[in-house]
Image (cartoon, rainbow, N blue to C red):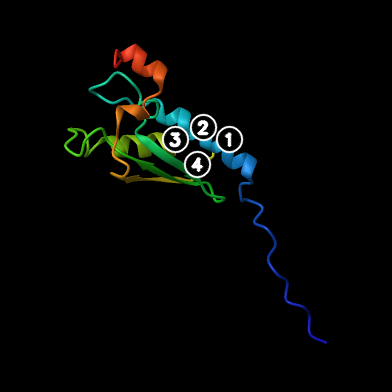
Amino acid sequence: MPEPIPTPGPDPAALNSIQRSVVEGEVIEAIRTVYDPEIPVNVYDLGLIYAVDVAEDGTVAIKMTLTSPACPVAGTLPGEVEAAARSAPGVKDATVELVWHPPFSIDRIPEHIRLELGFF
């Protein structure tokens, strides 16, 4: 009788949902070190980060926008966010996708930050 072919079990290196949540928090904190050069607020609290998705293998996919398609740092800011995310503990790799929908609006900025900036 032939030996049964073993089926692969769960990847022991795969992150579970709790570990992915922890890594997501680390990534967010790392992204908070990246500031918009025109507004003295980090890009996360400014509302430019639309999604941070951590996969089981520790790779991170980030969707972000800019305050305007004509933003003078359009060529550098996404790379800074990507580098910050890669520096977070538990991250194997990170990518940033620049998106324009929905368009950035000051409504994405938390109320307490808008107050600090005098946007009311």
> Real-space Cα distance between discs 4 and 3?
7 Å
Q: Which residue has dot 3 on it?
A: 87
Q: Position of residue 22 (x, y in %)?
A: 58, 35
Q: Which residue has dot 4 on it?
A: 91
Q: How many marks?
A: 4
Q: Which residue has dot 2 on it?
A: 26
Position of residue 30 relative to residue 56, above or below, is above
| Residue at 53% across, 32% down | 25
Identify residue type, mark 3: Ser
Q: Is residue 16 visible?
A: yes
Mark closer to the observer (1, 3): 1
Label pair 2/4, CB-CB below 8 angstroms: yes
Specify the quadrant of the image occupied by residue 87: top left
Q: Secondary structure at mark 2?
A: helix
Q: Is residue 12 left or right of residue 58?
A: right
| Residue at 22% across, 38% down | 74
Q: Is residue 75 left or right of residue 22?
A: left
Q: Secondary structure at mark 3?
A: loop
Q: Secondary structure at mark 4?
A: loop
The mark nearer the N terminus, 4 or 1, is: 1
Mark closer to the observer (4, 1): 1
Mark closer to the observer (2, 4): 2
